[in-house]
Amino acid sequence: MILTIDQGTTGTTALLVDENGAVQAKAYRDFKQYYPRPGWVEHDAEEIWQTVLDTSGELLDNRKPPQAIGITNQRETIVLWDRESGQPVAPAIVWQDRRTSGICKELKDAGREPDIRQKTGLLLDPYFSGTKLKWLLDHNLEFRHQAETGKLAAGTIDSWLIWKLTGGTVHATDYTNASRTLLFDLKARDWSDDLLDLFHIPRNLLPEARPSACEFGRTVDGPWGAGVLVCGVAGDQQAALFGQGCFQSGLAKNTYGTGCFFLSHRGENSTVSDAPILTTMAASAELEPLYAVEGSVFIAGAAVQWLRDEMGLIQDSAECEPVALSVNDTGGVYVIPAFSGLGAPHWNSDARGAILGITRGTNRAHIVRATLEAIAFQVADLVSIPELGSGIVELRVDGGACRNDLLMQMQADLLGIPVNRPKNIETTATGAAYLAGLGAGIWNSTEDLGALREVDRIFEPQMSENERMERIQEWHKALKRVL
């Protein structure tokens, strides 16, 4: 068995995956979200670690230790901790957090974005880790002093978990997570001295960056026992790309989670596009670097949670589809779920959500259906970017919201290409298991892994081209109202 730790934004899932790539057991714990100020989102890294212990303990009780451990994680969330005590010194700043908008604006106004973009493949946005780490050091002089004297360590969630699993003996990350920090040079595959100087971040604060499938270290005592190899690590979206069998250029996947994350494999092509998309490292079992391009939608499944928790229009997420199907269309209603700004291709952190086109006949079903459509529309906007969607003949999908058949049919209709859903939609965790299994010698090649993917259903487009273009034009009219 391979133990996969899937550490997400709202909870931690541990899975046991066998040599056929099948999930044999699964455990989950959520943890608290902290919103100390408007636009701020924080986690307690120690609480996250406890959920890893709890879920792993539940799975491994009365079982033999796993042969290997794989990690996949929420990517841009940053943790700062004391090297000696192994305790966090501040709350983890989550990828959704927008407190560093001012830092990003100052750097943009100073003309620094083009150089940062060419080195990192990223845009200047609060989404990424570098400005969050700069903020932590700038707002606490003691943190900065301790960082400069080597007393603190920093990293994304994968680094934090590797540190805890290995009893503080390994401070490392993988290329995919490093490439989301605004501090990592894609072509050199190392931290950029120029960017470290720009953000005023000491190099000794950061982990060593390594390939995704390699030996990161061995565990100390815990539910897994001592000496288990940690040998597969990737950020959640790159892990999902790998788990979907997208190992080569031209294959693409979209994950429907809290947000939507569309990745298209680019092979060895590291060219940074001028389009409003991201270039990032792809998970690889080889030493040669591989790359992907990515478009991010900030709010997807979170919009369904909003319907349930804040609006009270549905009782649970599963109710979304039957309620939406109770009407034939949205009645002209458009929901723009810009709760924390808009991601690609707009990258507008000031945009806010809206419900447009309401009439006296509008009811909850119209709003629920329009919310589902909004998810599909946002993904269609990503695929319309030539550098992201060109040459793609089908879209592979995963994530919790892809269970919704209506949403998947909407997606196929608005894209005009088939949507391919696998039987196992836990592809993020599966990708990490695949990487760990390759690192541990359970599988020998990506060819072995490709044979493990089983299709559940393919959704074929049913909408005419004229209707598709008309619907997209109406969506763009609504979108302009919040831009």
Image: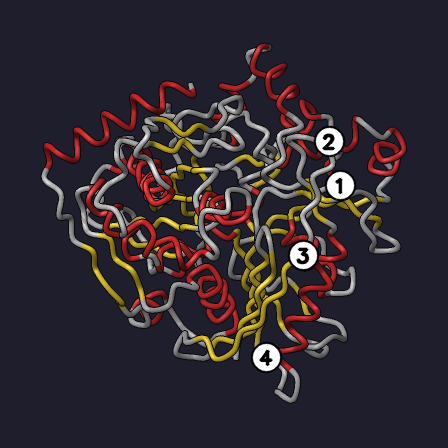
Label 4 to label 2: alpha-carbon separation: 37 Å
* Residue at x-position 54% and y-position 25%: 124
Q: Nearer the viewer, mark 4 or mark 2?
A: 4
Q: Nearer the viewer, mark 3 or mark 1?
A: 3
Q: Which structural element holds mark 2? A: loop
Q: Nearer the viewer, mark 1 or mark 4?
A: 4
Q: Position of residue 326 (x, y in %)?
A: 27, 51
- Residue lying furthest front in this view? 360
Q: Nearer the viewer, residue 277 or 442?
A: 277
Res. 31 mark = 3
Would you name the residue on which mark 1 appears?
205
Quick one: label 4, few (<14), some, or many (20+) residues within 10 Å?
Answer: some
Label 3 to label 1: alpha-carbon separation: 27 Å
Q: Amino acid at mark 4?
A: Pro
Q: Quadrant of residue 78?
A: top right
Q: Amino acid at mark 2?
A: Ile
Label 4 to label 3: alpha-carbon separation: 25 Å
Who comes first in sequence, dot 4 or dot 2? Answer: 4
Taking 433 as reference, is 9 left or right? right
